[in-house]
Amino acid sequence: MTLDRRITAFSKLGERLRSSLDEQSSGSDSSVEFENLIQKTTILNPWFTPSNVRLALDRWSQTLTAQNLLNWMSSYETKEIESKTVALVMAGNIPMVGFHDLLSVLMVGHKALVKLSSQDAVLMPYLVQQLTQIDPYFEDRVVFTKEKLQGFDMVIATGSNNTARYFDYYFSKYPNILRKNRNSVAVLTGQESVDDLKALANDVFQYFGLGCRNVTKLMVPESYDFQDFFGGMYHFSDIINHHKYANNYDYHKAVELLNGTDLLDNGFLLLKNSSHYASPIGMLHWESYSDRILLQSKFSQDQEFIQCVVGQDYVPFGNAQRPSLSDFADGIDTVEFLLKN
């Protein structure tokens, strides 16, 4: 199968997703099956609210265009290669988080042996089903399994710091990409506009902050006044009405107050002064800086913990959860890995 044919198939998948989302928003009778898919996903994982599932599907519908795919793949030597089987161990923290890996595997011409997270076991089979309807070539290119992975040539596994030890034990003898926990950070200067801070709220709250590209820590100038920051967050105040988010917010607030921690609190988001990048749901960590050059040096030293940096000189505010096809997780070029192993 040629690269052009693969690009055509995935671009048609993007068109199909756009059409289904448009039909659902218009209340078309033909959207019932799509609505059932979203509801089934939400029942399986309450963090995957209908709005968050639609957000993930919409982002991919916009990304999967023929031009985007062609521009992406044009950076590589894309001659036909020997087809191999790539084991994919997918996370389930946000909807469709493993789709980029699956896309990369199929785009270069390999087969995928997929072990889904139990938290995200609905959307990926649906997308593969749609892709197979578009082009039957893909029918035997993706296998989903709940059993022990075997019969593969290389592996891409995404999980927590705890599962990384398991990954290393079982997969170290294969060519691999093994991912652990990472978090994202925002750099504020105090000169941000109202629109900047509102956009930053998307980076903080989309998907309840569960993604590795969600901002979990703020770097702020010394003596920073958080009043404007909280104002920018306000349009996400309804997030406290989600019971799982509210339970996390209440729990961590109680724990920190019992420990005598100084917190800033706006009723739906806690701010805690901490050197750690990872923060609990319902809380952001913050740390002050005095020199932006030294700050960049800190990010370089801590790069194994950081997925992306948001700010005026970094990823634009509001775009943390809008990665391009070339924004690879952990900065490791997945396509290059697949082509060379």
Image: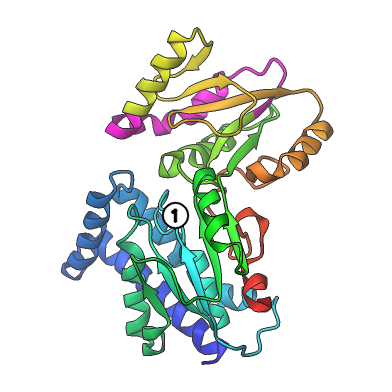
Q: Residue at x 36, y 71 (%)?
A: 144
Q: Which residue is mark 1?
A: 91
Residue 333, horizontal then vertical, whole percent: 66, 65
Q: Is residue 132 left or right of residue 193?
A: left
Q: Nearer the viewer, residue 328 or 88?
A: 88
Q: How many marks?
A: 1
Which element type, helix, strand or loop, lies under badge 1? loop
Task: Please tell me whether residue 75 is drawn above or below residue 78 in the rendered image.
Answer: above
Q: Residue at x 63, y 64 (%)?
A: 326
Which stretch appears magenta?
Answer: 219-246
Q: Nearer the viewer, residue 276 or 263?
A: 276
Q: Is residue 63 visible?
A: no
Residue 180, horizontal then vertical, whole percent: 56, 49
Task: Please tell me whether residue 12 is drawn above or below residue 308 in the rendered image.
Answer: below
Could you say which quadrant of the image residue 217 lies in? top right
Task: Please tell me whether residue 264 is drawn above or below residue 123 in the rendered image.
Answer: above
Could you say which quadrant of the image residue 266 lies in? top left
Q: Is residue 69 visible?
A: yes
Task: Please tell me whether residue 196 is drawn above or below residue 98 in the rendered image.
Answer: above
Check residue 250 for magenta coloring. Answer: no
Residue 203, horizontal then vertical, whole percent: 52, 41
Residue 300, horizontal then vertical, whole percent: 77, 42
Q: Amino acid at mark 1?
A: Ala
Q: Is residue 24 left or right of residue 184?
A: left
Q: Is residue 145 left or right of residue 173?
A: left
Could you say which quadrant of the image residue 58 lies in? bottom left
Q: Is residue 313 left or right of residue 157?
A: right
* Quarter of the picture holding the C terminus: bottom right
Q: Residue at x 54, y 64 (%)?
A: 156
